[in-house]
Amino acid sequence: MSSYILGIDVGTTSVKAALLETGSRSVIASQTAPTTSDIIDSTGIKAKEQHTGRIIDTLNRCVGSLPRDKLQHVGSIGLSGQMHGVLFWRGRAGCDWSNGDSFTPRGASQLITWQDGRCSSDFLLSLPKPESHLNVATGFGCATILWYTRHRPGFLVDFTVAGTIQDYVVSMLCGLDWCAMTPQNAASWGFFNTSSNQWNTEILKEAGFPLHLLPRCVLSGDLAGQTWSDWHGVPAGTPVGAALGDFQCSVYSCMRARTDAVLNISTSAQLTFAMPADFKPPDHPPPPPSSVSYVPYFKDSYLAVAASLNGGNVLAAFVEMLAAWLKELGTELSETCLYEKLIHCGLGQESSDLRVSPTLLGERHDPLCLGRVANISAANLSLGHVTRALCHGVLDNLTSMMPAERLRQAGVRRIVSSGSAVVRNEVLRQEVEKAFPFAVEYGQDADSAVGVAMALSDLR
């Protein structure tokens, strides 16, 4: 009888669940669904939150749609998800299992995501310097909690545990009163030393941080516990891995050699390569903030990553803008139809002297670097020019953060490119191939749900 690993990714816009056959390591079934969980900010503080209940409902629907006869033979569960963000709950009382073999949140907060902007530059400058090689930015869990301690301390009183959305799911599946967090997610929160695998507790304590909300650190690949109830056919007592980062798991799913660099353009964009096995990060963040970070991977190794906040989301913003303009002019086209027409226009324009810097969200290393358009003339205002220039700008921004020469010096020989924006947009694929003097492969799509299942299989 075959056994399976259930891999789950709780992403920014969707949830995916995949069943990996243990022996062949092939995906025999998967389900993906959008969460449609974004909450419109009416506070004026640039909050970016998602409805936790909708995310968990989508998770239950995805897992429940997999073949139940195979779920009954799941030998372990691995979870990854969107990093940096934070939600709060009250131990094992943070969910309700009364609906049979699924759970719903109870008394948990909304998810404050990695896109949250409430921590202004002035606020971040007021925070103590971390004892870590990684800087702290808005949207990072520890920064968000410190914001609450100063601006809404009463909010935190109701909660005993904090973690990422994937940590929350692990805790609820295992019936834990605490949160187990791996270095991959802890590093994304800030104030975490990846060399010692410890939080900067003394620094945080002096800053007024509620230390009881800090998760317990476990190694990437460790188990957090076992399911304490049947879950859509997955038996109680099934081992559950401590949650991993979606970025690391997506890289794990498609990086086949140390000479590969992985380019992913989905909601945001990342370009990464593996550091040498003996690499150790510096003790403190570089001044000024660097566009390249070193994030923990597996087995004490690191990835060098240029993580841009601006990827497919800026293309989506352009489409939304055009749809709004058309509506104001008395006509309407669906955003899907508009996107297809824009790609067609862009393909008809092989290049453009229009220059678009599409940093609508700024960047973590330079939050005030917002978008701009230059070299405008009467001859380059067509939709073809603008679409081509926008796609070029997404790549130009990313390669300004991590130039091709740096990849060459690291021994990179191939770009493995993936992500929903690349899959949908041939213009973007053309710009990828122009941006790098390496072979570009599209065949192996980065998949965090598959990656977390593969990692759990390899590391146990």
Image (cartoon, rainbow, N blue to C red):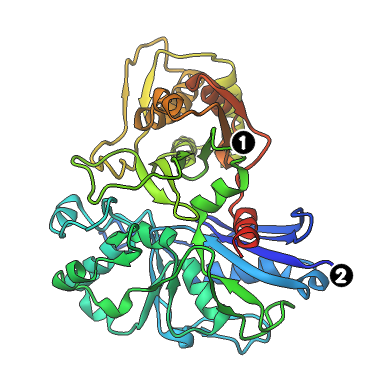
Q: Nearer the viewer, residue 250 or 146?
A: 250
Instruction: Say few, some or many: other residues with alpha carbon within 10 Å of mark 1 (under 14 / 14 to 19 / 20 or more).
Output: some
Q: Mark number for residue 1?
A: 2
Q: From mark 2 to mark 1, how far is it between C-alphas?
A: 39 Å
Report if residue 39 is visible in the image: no
Give the residue type that dot 1 points to: Arg
Give the residue type that dot 2 points to: Met
Q: Nearer the viewer, residue 359 or 374?
A: 359
Extreme residue in the top direction: 379
* Residue 446 lies in quadrant: top right
Please, is residue 267 above or below residue 91 in the view? Answer: above
Extreme residue in the front direction: 278
Residue 48 is situated, as x and y percent measured from the top left of the image, at 37, 58
Where does the N terminus fall, quadrant-wise?
bottom right
Q: Mark number for residue 117?
A: none
Q: Residue at x 59, y 31 (%)?
A: 425
Q: Earlier in the sequence, mark 2 or mark 1?
A: 2
Residue bearing mark 1: 424
